[in-house]
Image (tube, rainbow, N blue to C red):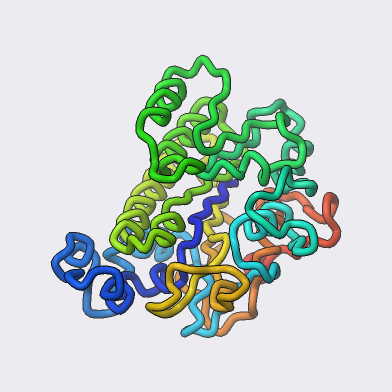
Amino acid sequence: MILITLDGASTQEIFGGLDADIFRTVNKNFEKTAAFKNYNAATPTERREKLMPFFWKTLMTSHGSIAGNRSLKSEVKTTNKLFFSYPGYSEILTGQAHDDVIKSNSHPQNPYPSFLDFLHQKFAVGPNAVAEFSSWDAFMRIATNKPGSFVVNAAYATYPTDNKEINELFRLQSQVLAPWPSVRHDYFTFKLAMAYMKEHKTRAIHIGFDETDDYAHDKNYERVLDTLHMTDKWIAELWNFVQSDARYKGRTSIVITVDHGRGNSPKDWSDHGEDVPEAQYIWMAFVSPDVQLRGEWKDSETIYQNQIAATLCKFIGLDYSEQNREAGKPIARLFAK
């Protein structure tokens, strides 16, 4: 199974593509930008397809489904009430919000085991069957309560390896510095994760992208759009690899989601947190050989961020409640006969 997260990628862009009202607030000449020319179109459907063509025209059409478009009466929400990254990622990975304990992005090592810890214990085949590759350095603290159990690689961290491709990526990531000291460029996160999967045939991996959130906080809307477009290409590359490798083809489930939403107006689109109620609304996309749902969910029950861990485990035949009985339950609609 593969979990992909796009930090702070809002429902507005995912379901509607480029938002001219937002673009106008940060650039009075936005219509002259390359991003506007590349991603603008007459309708929300056309705009989102130009922004993420593989995701919308191939993955969600022929292979998977997506929940969270409230205009279609499909709602996805966090259960944590803080609406920022560490609490959101902890809820995703552990299956439970802990607002009374995890109150800050600077929280130390996660005291709660993640579903990656659970799978590492269940697989019992060495440290390479489970892996975490993320752009934000906080994942060194978020992804596991037992550091060293499996590879957790985030920001500019390295680890000993004889893999020449990985070592070259480590060398380059230290020279191609992102604007944010705690975050490396998503390109390196993706390429490192791919190289690791090819070498170790990893059974469970989380790939955590971050630049969508960083550029939004910087109010660089053009780069938010460009990052979503580039991420779409990486998802396509990952999918093509999965389909071409006998270890993964026909056996791999993928969940793509987000840690929190954002504000829904030109005034607060760059923000999130407990004072931005709109940030509780998120989205989830599902691709699995065992699930026949396609396209957008409509008139569906509300699903929650705390259900992701149990859902991913059920995709591979495991019961996550063995580790955490308080975690959210698997998403019923995905497993209905």
Q: Residue at x 58, y 78 (%)?
A: 277
Residue situated in front as seen by the camera: 107 or 308: 107
Please tell me whether residue 207 is drawn above or below residue 41 in the rendered image.
above
Residue 281 in view (yes/no): yes
Residue situated in front as seen by the camera: 12 or 110: 110
Residue 240 in view (yes/no): no
Q: Residue at x 53, y 45 (%)?
A: 136
| Relative side of 305 to 5, left or right | right
**What count of labels does the image hold?**
0
- Quadrant location of the C terminus in the rendered image: bottom right
Q: Going by the picture, which residue comes out furthest to the top?
A: 162
Residue situated in front as seen by the camera: 111 or 6: 111
Q: Quadrant of residue 143?
A: top right
Q: Residue at x 59, y 75 (%)?
A: 275
Q: x, y percentage for residue 203?
A: 62, 38
Please tell me whether residue 14 is drawn above or below residue 229 in the rendered image.
below
Q: x, y percentage for residue 101?
A: 78, 58
Q: x, y percentage for residue 3?
A: 57, 50
Please tell me whether residue 131 is drawn above or below residue 309 in the rendered image.
above
Q: Residue at x 48, y 75 (%)?
A: 263
| Relative side of 53 to 3, left or right | left
Residue situated in front as seen by the camera: 84 or 188: 84
Q: x, y percentage for residue 323?
A: 83, 50
